[in-house]
Image (cartoon, helix red, strand yellow):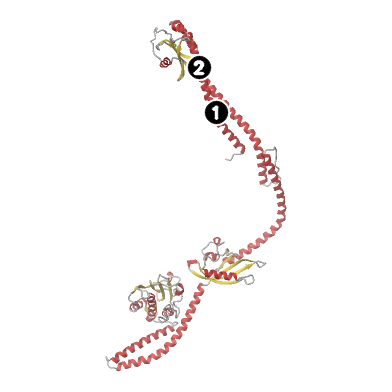
Amino acid sequence: MTFGIRAKLLIFTILIILLIAGTLLPIFYFHERQQILQSYKRESVSIAMTMSSASFNDLYFLNVKGLRVLLETFRASPRIQSVYVVDLQGMVLADGTNENVLRNTYLPRKIAFMERVLSSKIWIAEINGDFLNIGGPVNLEGLAPIGYVYAGVSLEELRSIFSNLTRTYFFVFSGVLVISVVIVNVFSSLFTRRILDLTAAADRISSGSADTSVPISGKDEIARLGNAFKRMLDKLQALYKQERRRSQELSIEVASRRATEERLKDSESRYRAVVEDQTELICRFTPQRAVSFVNEAYARFFKLDSMDALGAPVFGNISDDDQARVDRVIAGLSCHAPVDAVDLNMIGEGSESRVINWTIRLICDEQEVPMEYQAVGRDVDELRQAQHQVLQAQKLDSLGQFAAGISHNLKNMLQPILALSQMTYQNLPKGSEAQGNLRLVIDATENAKSLVEKITAFGRHGEKQDKIIDINEAIAKTLEFARSTIPSNIIVDQELSLNSGMVRAEVYEIENVLLNVISNAAEAFEGASGRIEVALNKIDPSMDGKDESNNHGSFARIVVSDNGPGMDKATAEKIFDPFFTTKAVGKGMGMGLASAYGTVKKLEGAIDVDSHQGKGTKILIDLPLVGP
């Protein structure tokens, strides 16, 4: 509930009056009541003293008739309800409630109040219940008392006086309250009427009535407020007229601009539809590098809400080198050469590092003043990987053709050596030293022939294989041989799933892949102890959608993992390249993993690496299975 100024003044005044009256009137009331009580006591005592003095002789001579007259005199007073006359020892001589006097038929008795009178020797008065007890000596001035009189005075008259006093104070309080409220109401009406007039005028102005007049009267502060309000109103009316004219002038311009805005909105909606549907990352940013617009693809890549991206730094958190490249590209843009491109490594969806090619365009106004930049980003990471794979395949193809040519010539050279050695071996005496030496030559020649056949097979990597082998059995036999070729402080564990299926391959091809991978893992320990684990599982393509070979159906996955030192990303990307090696000169030609890669590709499989420095390396080999 809201109270106006007038109501607040009335409430305030009533509270003040109630506070003052509630404090002072009780004080005056109880003071006057006490005065009346004391006066009533004094009058009653005076009456009793007068009557008792008049009966001194009768009491002195114990005149029965005189005592009866005394009793009748006391009873005649409307105030006195009872009276007793006692001697100096406090024994009753006359009782106003009984006609007997001088102990004629009435037995003497003591009165408690008279005991206090006897001890005080003066007239005293005290209220006891519904009566005012009065008692004192009977004597003449200057003489000793000859007895005492007790009178019980009724308080009805005093109560009537008090009741009248209460009504009087109530009427006085009510009158003061009513008169004060009336006075305050009149003065508050005079005070608030002008304020209400100003308020009404302000309400009319706020409702749109600019021609409102402000009534002003008096010369006090309210009148000065009214004058100030009137001056303000005059200015507002002048401004209103001025704005009205301006509004009329702008109405035509607003209509034309509205039509222009509608066309712009339609154009912008078409532009946004085109931009939002793009898979490229599109953004605009100010010369201060703050983003002013992004499409959904940009927000999704950086895991941002479209609105949260506004005002954020463009391109997010990039390395110092990438930031330097961006600075160089932007610094080189001008209104005459507004476009350039830069490749940046960025962390996007899936928290993976991606290579984004950004085409940055400088947007200038008609005066060739740079306004903002527009950037369109395309994910070229997969394209680069594809280019790298094509280049690697071309390298391997060239190497295979070169190796096939050399191996063919070597094979032709080894054929007569092996044939003549075997014929000579048969003609030598059995157990002779010459036959033993020739046996070594034959074994070395057969090993060389086997190596040449492997090189020839590497050169024919595109040819189909007709032989079907049990992958589980081929791996198990290869691991038995591998354990004998690596240091004893490196443990080779295996976990081969039974019934993993059949693959189209030669056993020596599986041996070539596994021995090269395991040998490379063992050499990574550099003499330290370690563990290599080889696992084989049958994989359904629905379980591994990212695999390159899942278009063949089910496939066998061989995982060779170690707890060695691992490698960084740059090294991992090159380990399958021909002639790439991290070993010292003379300790490796970098053909082991390249040969494994070529063999797996020949078998229409896939090979990949997952390695992190300090966390070991994992080689994943997928080979398509034959049959269900």
- Horizontal side, residue 309 vs residue 240: left or right: left
Q: Secondary structure at mark 2?
A: helix
Q: Residue at x 60, y 36 (%)?
A: 9
Pick the residue in front: 623 or 466: 623
Return the residue at label 2.
42
Q: Which numbered disc flags the more N-terminal residue, 2 or 1?
A: 1
Q: Residue at x 67, y 61 (%)?
A: 260
Q: How many marks?
A: 2
Please determine whether, in this image, residue 99 is positioned above or below residue 11: above
In the rendered image, is residue 298 in sight? Answer: yes
Q: Amino acid at mark 2?
A: Arg
Q: Residue at x 66, y 37 (%)?
A: 193
- Quarter of the picture containing the C terminus is bottom left
- Horizontal side, residue 346 vs residue 610: left or right: right
Residue 32 percent location from the top left of the image:
53, 23
In the rendered image, is residue 78 in sight? Answer: no
Residue 421 percent location from the top left of the image:
34, 92
Residue that protrudes farthest toward the left in the picture: 431
Q: Which class describes the residues within 10 Å of circle 2: few (<14), some (14-19), or many (20+)?
A: some
Return the residue at label 1.
24
Pick the residue in front: 71 or 114: 114
Q: Amino acid at mark 1?
A: Leu
- Horizontal side, residue 589 vs residue 277: left or right: left
Residue that protrudes farthest toward the front in the picture: 142
Give the distance between the C-alpha atoms of the residues marked 2 and 1, in whole angstroms: 27 Å
Q: Residue at x 48, y 66 (%)?
A: 351
